Image (spheres, rainbow, N blue to C red):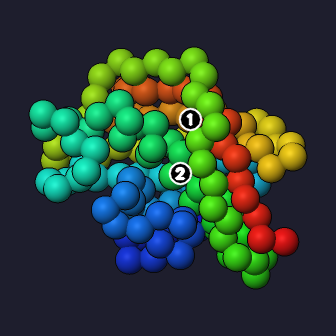
Amino acid sequence: MTQDNESNIEDCIPHRKPMIMVDGLHTATDSMAVSTFAIVPGNVLLSHGYLSEAGLIENIAQTAAAHAGYWYRKNGKEIPSGFIAAVKNLRIASLPALGTSIQTTIHAINQILGMTIVDGIVEQNREILCSCELKIFIKTYD
């Protein structure tokens, strides 16, 4: 398990401001991770006072990136870059408002040939806001 915060989340992900959509990685095991994110003014993926659908998807992807980055860093390897290759079974119940926080959980279901498949759930006050499966291509530097 790890306790990261906003000051060092950049040590775990390849993203930089203004595209950071994760404040902290709070739990990391071999197959899952939990992150938090505060929706603050100036976020580039805000729309009419709410984090947009794209922001929710990016938050799930960055939680997966933080999970991978944590393990690469822990093993003395360079943090890989990656991109979303596919989004499947996207369900959005509601969008988080400006001034609130979300918690995101990812479960890595499969990894093959540089592709990682994760299930992601975004929650707020124990209510599921968004869920989906992401296929993420990871470019390693081995």
Res. 132 visible in picture = yes
Residue 63 tag number: 2
Query: Position of 46 compared to 91: left or right?
Result: left
**Quadrant housing residue 130:** top left
The residue drawn where x is 76% and y is 54% is 30
Query: Position of 128 compared to 70: left or right?
Result: left
The residue drawn where x is 60% and y is 48% is 83
Residue 120 tag number: 1
What number of labels is visible? Answer: 2
From the viewer's side, name the closer residue of 99 and 16. 16
What residue type is disc 1 on?
Gly
Separation of residues labelled 2 and 1 (CA atoms): 9 Å
Element class at badge 1: strand
From the viewer's side, name the closer residue of 48 and 36. 48
Q: Position of residue 33 (x, y in %)?
A: 60, 50
**Quadrant housing residue 82:** bottom right
